[in-house]
Image (spheres, rainbow, N blue to C red):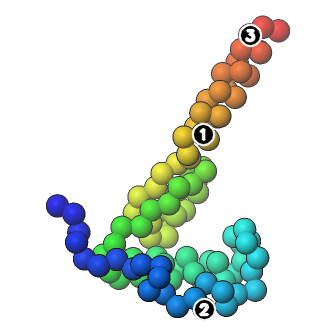
């Protein structure tokens, strides 16, 4: 039922893969970050592995799907809860004016 082929383990990768960049942590628009994501997508697709991502918006999910990700999760549990609560509070406030 489950694919039992070997997976890439972070310890198997050379440290230079992660540290040869000019980017700073959290700089997700940096070309080195985009290139790293492209390498991950290519490796997953070439090896028949699923590739997933948690996204904040439906539009972002569509973009990742178009770029080779085959499963998308939208939002975390806290994001979903916060969004629903904010919407309910806005409706409550509007109804009480």
Secondary element type, mark 3: helix
Q: Is residue 78 above or below residue 69?
A: above
**The C terminus is located in which quarter?**
top right
Q: Are marks 2 and 3 in contact (CB under 8 Å)?
A: no
Q: Which mark is residue 16?
A: 2
Image point (29%, 79%), residue name: 6
How many marks can you see? 3
Residue 63 left/right relative to 42: right
Q: Are marks 3 and 1 in contact (CB under 8 Å)?
A: no
The residue where tag 3 is placed is 95
Residue 43 is situated, as x and y percent measured from the top left of the image, at 41, 82
Residue 7 is drawn in which quadrant?
bottom left
Residue 36 is situated, as x and y percent measured from the top left of the image, at 57, 81
Image point (47%, 82%), residue name: 11
Residue 17 is drawn in which quadrant?
bottom right
Residue 69 is situated, as x and y percent measured from the top left of the image, at 44, 66
Residue farthest toward the top in the current orientation of the protein = 96
Mark 3 and mark 1: Cα distance apart in space:
25 Å
Secondary element type, mark 1: helix
Image point (70%, 87%), residue name: 21
Sequence-wise first label, 1 or 2: 2
Residue 90 is situated, as x and y percent measured from the top left of the image, at 73, 22
Q: Is residue 84 above or below residue 13?
A: above
How crowded is the residue under tag 1: few (<14 C-alpha within 10 Å), some, or many (20+)?
Answer: few
The residue where tag 1 is placed is 78
Residue farthest toward the right in the current orientation of the protein = 97
Q: Which mark is residue 66?
A: none
Mark 2 and mark 3: Cα distance apart in space:
58 Å
Mark 1 and mark 2: Cα distance apart in space:
35 Å
Q: Is residue 83 above or below residue 45?
A: above
Sequence-wise first label, 3 or 1: 1
In this view of the protein, can residue 42 be seen by the observer? no
């Amino acid at each position: 039922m489950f694919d039992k082929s070997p997976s890439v383990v972070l310890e198997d990768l050379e440290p230079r893969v992660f540290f040869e960049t000019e980017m700073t942590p959290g700089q997700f628009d940096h070309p080195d970050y985009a290139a790293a994501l492209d390498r991950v997508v290519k490796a997953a697709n070439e090896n028949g592995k699923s590739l997933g991502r948690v996204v904040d918006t439906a539009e972002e999910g569509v973009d990742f799907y178009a770029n080779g990700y085959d499963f998308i999760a939208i939002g975390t549990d806290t994001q979903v809860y916060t969004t629903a609560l904010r919407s309910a509070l806005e409706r409550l406030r509007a109804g009480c004016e």
